[in-house]
């Protein structure tokens, strides 16, 4: 009877070790990247126009108000607080709409960008989002040096999207993906505030 229990115990230990090995091997590249970057304990809070992750809601809207008065940004169609800034491309313009997300403490913890070509039309494939995303990713890498983007299957971290391009530097994460044939979305968020 004791031999049988010892055999069962050994079998359970082997199963447990096998499961641990399986789980460690299946930790996604994304989760490894997030863990590695958060362990660096480096804070990146810069966004655009001197807007920073973690700033008070009032400060964010004060900055936006000043940018609007100067004609740098202007209201855009979308969720409450959506603003538009026009970027110049080689042969066209790119609209960069953005709106904030605040946590329970009324601190800015995310900014959602929506990029599109104002001249987009179904017959103009040069302005489709599959070409636009390359420009967007390249711009983000120039604006925010650090790690490169990795590609992740959308069902791993965002269920309704196929592929997501993710860049994580310290606590700041960029997730870029297609909204449709016209628009590219980039979510920027503070991973320490999730």
Image (cartoon, rainbow, N blue to C red):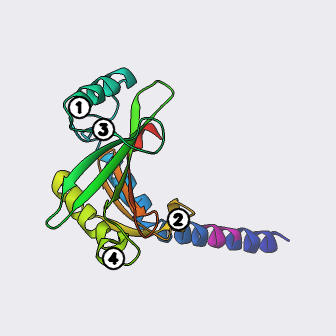
Q: At which x and y percent is residue 72?
A: 21, 38
The reply, left or right, for residue 9 in relation to residue 164 is: right
Q: At which x and y percent is residue 37?
A: 32, 51
Residue position marked by numbered label 2 in the rendering: 156
Q: State the predominant SS element of the stretch in magenta.
A: helix
Q: Say which element carries label 2.
A: helix
Question: Looking at the image, is mark 1 or mark 3 nearer the viewer?
Answer: 3
Residue position marked by numbered label 1 in the rendering: 67
State which tag comes first along the sequence, 1 or 2.
1
What is the spatial separation of the Cα atoms under label 4 and label 2, in whole angstroms?
Answer: 32 Å
Location of the N terminus by quadrant is bottom right
Magenta segment boundaries in residue numbering: 12-16
Q: Is residue 69 above or below residue 161?
A: above
Residue position marked by numbered label 4 in the rendering: 124
Question: Looking at the image, is mark 2 or mark 3 nearer the viewer?
Answer: 3
As drawn, which residue projects farthest toward the left?
A: 90
Label 3 packing within 10 angstroms: few (<14), some (14-19), many (20+): some
State which tag comes first along the sequence, 4 or 2.
4
């Amino acid at each position: 009877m004791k031999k049988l229990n010892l055999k069962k115990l050994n079998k359970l230990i082997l199963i447990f070790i096998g499961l641990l090995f399986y789980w460690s091997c299946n930790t996604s590249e994304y989760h490894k990247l997030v863990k590695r970057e958060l362990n660096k304990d480096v804070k990146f809070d810069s966004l655009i126009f001197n807007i920073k992750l973690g700033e008070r809601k009032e400060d964010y809207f004060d900055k936006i108000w000043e940018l609007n008065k100067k004609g740098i940004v202007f209201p855009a169609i979308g969720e409450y607080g959506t603003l538009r800034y026009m970027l110049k491309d080689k042969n066209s313009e790119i609209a960069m709409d953005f709106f904030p997300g605040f946590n329970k403490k009324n601190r800015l913890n995310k900014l959602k960008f929506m990029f599109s070509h104002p001249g987009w039309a179904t017959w103009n494939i040069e302005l489709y989002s599959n070409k636009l995303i390359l420009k967007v990713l390249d711009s983000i890498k120039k604006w925010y040096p650090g790690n490169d983007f990795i590609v992740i299957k959308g069902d791993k971290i965002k269920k309704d999207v196929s592929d997501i391009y993710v860049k994580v530097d310290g606590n700041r994460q960029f997730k870029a993906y297609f909204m449709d044939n016209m628009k590219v979305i980039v979510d920027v968020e503070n991973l320490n505030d999730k």
